[in-house]
Amino acid sequence: MCDKDAELPSWHTVLRHVREDEEAYRQYREARVLQSEYYRDEIIKIVEAPLPADPKLAMAEVQRRRLEVDAKDKFIRQLAPSGVRDKPEDSGGAQGGTLVIQWGQKAEPPAMIDVTNAIDHVDE
């Protein structure tokens, strides 16, 4: 936007304002998160576009698309690592909890195993 209109301030001025003003930063983050959603839609279009009929051209196009999709996907993860709501709960990270393993059909509840202090090791 700054590059296309000579009457707008330069990128340096905009980013300095974003860095210094909390409300501007909030709006900037929101815009970047929404931009990541746009790129997600672009990735779908790239993947679903038909390939050329020539097998050699098709393979070259697949490789080109793979590079483009990987670059956009990386950019998306940088823009919005926590999802469209920009909140950590959207990230789907590892969850803690208890794992219960049960064999057979016992009527009593299974024994709980505490693995909080367990150490993985490999027999050599």
Image (spheres, grey):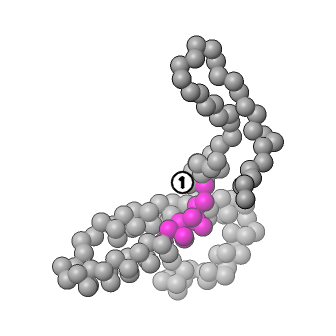
Q: Amino acid at mark 1?
A: Val
Side (left or right) of 44 relative to 120: left
Q: Main secondary structure of the magenta part?
A: helix
Q: Quadrant of residue 56?
A: bottom left
Question: In the image, residue 89 lies at what x, y percent?
Answer: 63, 46
Circle 1 residues within 10 Å: few <14, some 14–19, many ≥20 = some
Q: Is residue 53 magenta?
A: no
Residue span colored magenta: 72-82
In this orientation, does residue 28 appear?
yes
Q: Secondary structure at mark 1?
A: loop
Q: Quadrant of residue 96?
A: top right
Residue under label 1, please give it. 84
In this orientation, does residue 31 appear?
no
Farthest-out residue, right:
117
Point 68% across, 33% down: residue = 98
Question: In the image, residue 9 lies at what x, y percent?
Answer: 61, 81
Farthest-out residue, top:
107
Farthest-out residue, front:
124
Question: As displayed, is residue 10 above or below residue 80?
Answer: below
Point 76% across, 34% down: residue = 114
Question: In the image, residue 63 lies at what x, y percent?
Answer: 38, 79
Q: Nearer the viewer, residue 80 or 68?
A: 68
Question: In the image, residue 7 lies at what x, y percent?
Answer: 54, 83
Point 45% across, 66% down: residue = 39
The C terminus - image quarter: bottom right
